[in-house]
Amino acid sequence: MFLEAAAATGSAWALRRIAHHAILRGLRAPRLAHAQGPDEHGFAADQVREVRVPGPRGRQLFGWLVSPPVTAQRPAPAVLAMHGWGANAAMMWPVVPPLHAAGFAVLLIDARCHGRSGDETFTSMPRFAEDIAAGLAWLRLQPDIAVDRVALLGHSVGAAAALLHASRHHDVRAVVSLSAFAHPREVMRRHMTEKRVPYPVLGWYVLRHVQRVIGVSFDDIAPLGTLARVRCPVLLVHGRSDSAVPVGDAQRLLAVSSRVRLLLVDGDHDLRGTLAPHAPTLVDFLSTACALPAVAVPDGLD
């Protein structure tokens, strides 16, 4: 009897380990190479430098630091931009030219397991938030940066992570959230539906296991909850045709806090090709939050 019980216990443990590794493999973000850099957006070598930011757990985070223009006030305000799941810092380059023209320094970083940053067994939205915190700490040590005038800009999971950070630390002037979702459980449910994972049979276990692995419940990190605790102004930007995160998520987030504004734009989840006409709105929002004087900025996001 004892041997049978031990064998059954061992089999159950082995099955859980197999399921654990299968879930991590299935949810692992693809690591994409940087497809573009500062040259494609008109920046000279003396305006941009590649950086290595000390990250959590001894990992290094790759990034680019774009210095403010020589005519900008010193110390200068700064924006840290965080990409979304399966993306990388290079995909955030289109937001840099108008911010730079308005006098901001900009730090683009790769989250762990993305781009050229260090690897981990897994990453998650809370780990994106940890990487944001590491980036902010490094940025505030750089010369000519106004440590009290720093803002965040994030896309998708990066946006949710920016809201999570701002809900916990209250150390940024503003957050621009591009294509944020309302609740990670809903994102996971949609993902599993696309992959034809039956929820009543397997989906509930996947959700429970993911929360155990990342060490926090989805409810605790959902933008629907974190946004209410953010004290700085927040600009939600969402595509009317977003097929990954329904535009209704943005409407639900808008109702959470009086500090939130919503800008609906034509476009899908990515937004890189459709933000150009709205660059002045984003810059004005961040400039006002950082107490900058009004400046003329380019209409386009290159």
Image: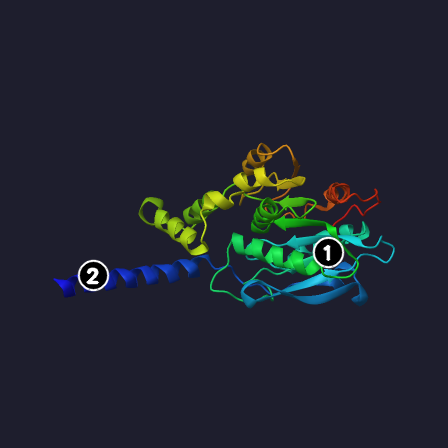
Above or below, 57 against 288 in this view is: below
Residue at (81% x, 66% y) in the render? 46
* Residue 69, picture quadrant: bottom right
**Cβ–Cβ below 8 Å for labels 2 and 1?**
no
Which secondary structure lies at badge 1?
strand
Answer with left or right where residue 68 lies relative to residue 254: right
Where does residue 244 sit, x and y in percent of width and height?
A: 53, 45
Going 15% across and 66% down the picture, which residue do you hit? 3
The amino acid marked with disc number 2 is Ala
* Residue 230 picture location, percent across and down: 61, 41
Residue 105: quarter of image: bottom right
Assess disc 2: are there few (<14), some (14-19) or many (≥20) residues with their C-alpha within 10 Å of its C-alpha. Answer: few
Q: Which residue is mark 2?
A: 8
**Residue 271 horizontal/vertical position (percent):** 64, 47
Q: CA distance from mark 2 to mark 1?
A: 56 Å
Name the residue that disc number 1 marks. Answer: 106
Q: Does the image show residue 199?
A: yes
Of all residues shown, which one is farthest toward the left?
A: 1
Identify the residue at horizontal 69%, vertical 44% (top origin). 174
Q: Note whether 46 is above or below 145 in the view shown.
A: below
Task: Please identify the residue farthest to the right as the structure is shown.
Answer: 71
- Looking at the rendering, in which quadrant would you find the N terminus? bottom left
Nearer to the camera, 22 or 109: 109
Task: Work out whether residue 144 or residue 152 is closer to the camera in this orientation and state it.
Answer: 144
Image height of 11 relative to 192, above or below: below
Q: Which mark is residue 93?
A: none
For numbered disc 2, what is the local secondary structure?
A: helix
Q: Residues within 10 Å of mark 1 (few under 14, many from 20)?
A: many
Q: Amino acid at mark 1?
A: Val
The image position of residue 16, as x and y in percent, is 32, 59
Earlier sequence position, callout 2 versus callout 1 = 2
Q: Is residue 247 above or below residue 207?
A: above
